[in-house]
Amino acid sequence: MKNIFLIFIFITIGYSQIIEEREIEENKLFFSYLKYSGVKFYHVYDNSLEILNSDGSYYKSVSIPVELDMEVQNVYLLSEGVFTSSVDLSFAVTYFKNGNILKYHTNIVSESGSVILSMPKVNFVSVTDSEDGPKMVSWIYDDGEYRSKLYSLPGDLVSETEIDQNLVKESIRLENPFPNPSNGNILLNYHLPEGETKGEMKIFNSNGIEVRNFLVDDSFSSIVIETDQLPSGSYHYIIKTKSSVSGKKTFVVVK
């Protein structure tokens, strides 16, 4: 009996605890796996989308555009490189208005808060991959009846296999650029995971347009970028290998 009691104590102590990290008041918390930034949590807060890191710390906020006389019903499909061909965030917002006739509107919104696509009367959109690339389906609610539209998307969807692989394996690591901001050369440090010997560094401007790309390998752990030919502004960069994509880092060029 004594032995059984001791075994029970050891088993009880061996269990990990579920720990509350943060409470979000007056709203629901959702999550998404982003292609370049990994797992993020998000919720609507004061006409903005507040995005949190996986440890619950603040990541960034994006303004939600206002639709005249309409309320936000849902914010969803937070993603990177799906609704655009850049590395920037984007998401869907569905609005509604109660009255004699129920009205809906859906916008696809960029990281800057601008509207990429405006869809009157649409009350829901969904995305899927296909042999012809990623597609979006919209549901249009028009005077009590539904119809749909099919769209092709410029980006890429993250598959469940990619998510599983990226969560399990060691990821590409980007260190903070130095100096930052910079008006001359800037040092970008990186670390390729074990088994990856080469990759491609891509640099994008604030509009998501690729402006530079460089081949990198595991012979070095840094690359020096000359900023003389880059206009003043913010730039994002990532590294892609044959099987993974890094998170993105930002540097600022000043003149």
Image (cartoon, rainbow, N blue to C red):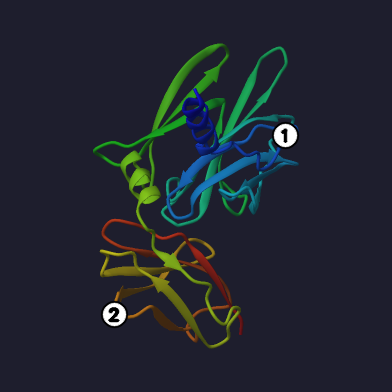
Picture residue at 68% right of the left edge, 36% below the top: 67
Give the x, y percent position of residue 8. 51, 28
- Asked if one can make out residue 190 in the rendered structure from this viewpoint, the answer is yes
Picture residue at 66% right of the left edge, 25% below the top: 96
Few, some or many residues within 10 Å of mark 1 (<14, 14–19, 20+): few
Q: How many marks?
A: 2
Position of residue 247 relative to residue 148, above or below, is: below
Which label number is shown at residue 109?
none
Give the x, y percent position of residue 70. 71, 29
Amino acid at pointer 1: Leu
Position of residue 74 relative to residue 91, above or below, is: above
Single out the mark in the foreground, 1 or 2: 2
Give the x, y percent position of residue 242. 26, 59
Task: Check disc 2 and report the residue beneath it.
Answer: 219
Question: Which quarter of the rendered picture does the C terminus lie within?
Answer: bottom right
Picture residue at 31% right of the left edge, 42% below the top: 161
Element under disc 1: loop
Viewer-closest of 87 and 232: 87
Element under disc 2: loop
Picture residue at 29% right of the left edge, 80% below the top: 219
Question: As drawn, is 216 to the left or to the right of 250?
Answer: left
Which label number is shown at residue 68?
1
